[in-house]
Amino acid sequence: MIDVAFAHVSKRYKINQPVSAVGGSPSRGTKDFWALKDVSFEVGHGETLGVIGHNGAGKSTILKLLSQITSPTSGEIRLAGRVAALIEVGSGFHPELTGRENVYLSGSILGMKRREIDRKLEQIIEFAGVREFIDTPVKWYSSGMYVRLGFAVAAHLEADILLVDEVLAVGDAAFQLQCIDRLNELRRSGTTMLFISHDLSSIEKLCDRVALMEHGELVASGAAHEIVEQYQRTAASAHIAAVADAKIRTAAGGAKVGAITFHDLEGKEVLTTSTGAPLIARVHFQAFRSVEDAVVEVFYYSRDGRTLHFQQSTAIGGGELTLSPGGGVVEFSMPGLGLQPGIYSIGATIRERSGADTIDWFYGRTALYVEPGKSVRGYFYTPHDWRLVTEHAQAGDRSPNA
């Protein structure tokens, strides 16, 4: 049974733009912007479809069409059952009303009957964790309390089809896990879901299939892990191309980083690797003078260049490092890469251990794409062994986590 069907759906918006009038004052004209172009897909009963793509790819337009916030320019949309949307949770709250009053207000806006809200009120309050403040006006709520209550209302709708748009970005880590558990509970109950998120890890965990959107077109659809990998590869290629001409920020002379490269154990240069795989990082440098007691470091940043995930440094372990005039390579070996899947920007520095100044800072021309490998939760994989320890444990009762 098919619960959701998009058949050759297109959506056009008219965009105003200034147009100069000859011999008179400027007038305004319009141009067409196609948010969706001939998109077709189906979602079976009880299935969860993830929709991914860059900003402006058409993901939110799909949800607006399914929510009947707007209508398609052409094509047909078929829905079998009651539709509910988890979009901008808490947006319908009135600040002067209490949490309890806003549960009824928001629930009615979302299409819930009063008897349905009465029946689920205790579950909603418990889920949101705001029992102590449920009769307090929400204008006094923290932002976390506000979104928790908003999600709790929407997540307890009795719907056949649930539309979810980036709601897992709200709240703290514990509440996000609670949200995922609730969505999994709805999946098990047979609710059909469309899930939009930039959190590719959640997409893989929650979705049966994934649709990849690009510039308003559906470019790929299939098993979640396959489409997520395809998207990450495409994004990595685009990122590497974009940073190819980026500025190298260099401090005051003495040595210069020329490149950072990655290699497998056989020495072959690679642009992609996987979580837990062995990897070699090489910093290629040119020294213009002898740099004694030098420190060479490699930094791994999130794609936005802001979050430092980890660092490798010659200051940890080993002896003194002297860079002699001429070219050279400093090599870092990793028995198992700890980074989770994603795209990482790479930087490197050369400095003197005793000095405060950085000799050279290289950033912006290297990116590393990490594919799924070792399956762990969280943000970092740490290579480890494990064993069962009992009174009769033998020395050989040891099993490496392969």
Image (cartoon, grey):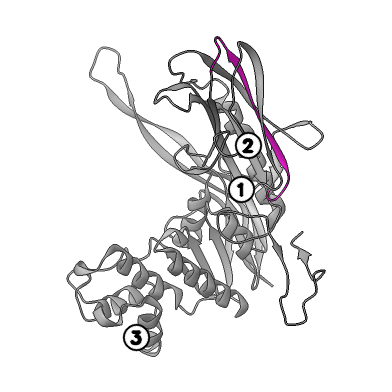
Q: Nearer the viewer, residue 144 or 334?
A: 334
Identified by mark 1, the residue type is: Leu
Disc 1: which residue: 339
Quarter of the image that includes the C terminus: bottom right
Q: Earlier in the sequence, mark 1 or mark 3?
A: 3
Q: Can you tell which quarter of the image residue 261 is in?
A: top right
Disc 3: which residue: 114
Along the horizontal axis of the image, is 187 left or right of 223?
A: left
At horizontal 71% and vertical 40% (from top left) the residue drawn is 279
Q: Can you tell which quarter of the image residue 269 is in?
A: top right
Along the horizontal axis of the image, is 145 left or right of 127?
A: left
SS at mark 2 in the image: strand
Dot 2 alpha-carbon crowd within 10 angstroms: few under 14, some 14 to 19, many 20 or more: many
Identified by mark 3, the residue type is: Arg
Q: Can you tell which quarter of the image residue 5 is in?
A: bottom right
The mark closer to the camera, 2 or 3, is 2
* Distance (Cα) linking label 1 and label 2: 10 Å
Numbered range of the magenta stretch: 275-291
Where 25 sits versus 180, above or below? above
Labels 1 & 2 near each other (Cβ < 8 A):
yes
Q: Which mark is residue 110?
A: none
The mark closer to the camera, 1 or 3, is 1
Labels 2 & 3 near each other (Cβ < 8 A):
no
Where 103 sits versus 177, above or below? below
SS at mark 1 in the image: loop
At horizontal 77% and vertical 77% (from top left) the residue drawn is 393
Disc 2: which residue: 368
* Distance (Cα) linking label 2 and label 3: 53 Å
How far from the left and from the top, in percent, is residue 335?
71, 46
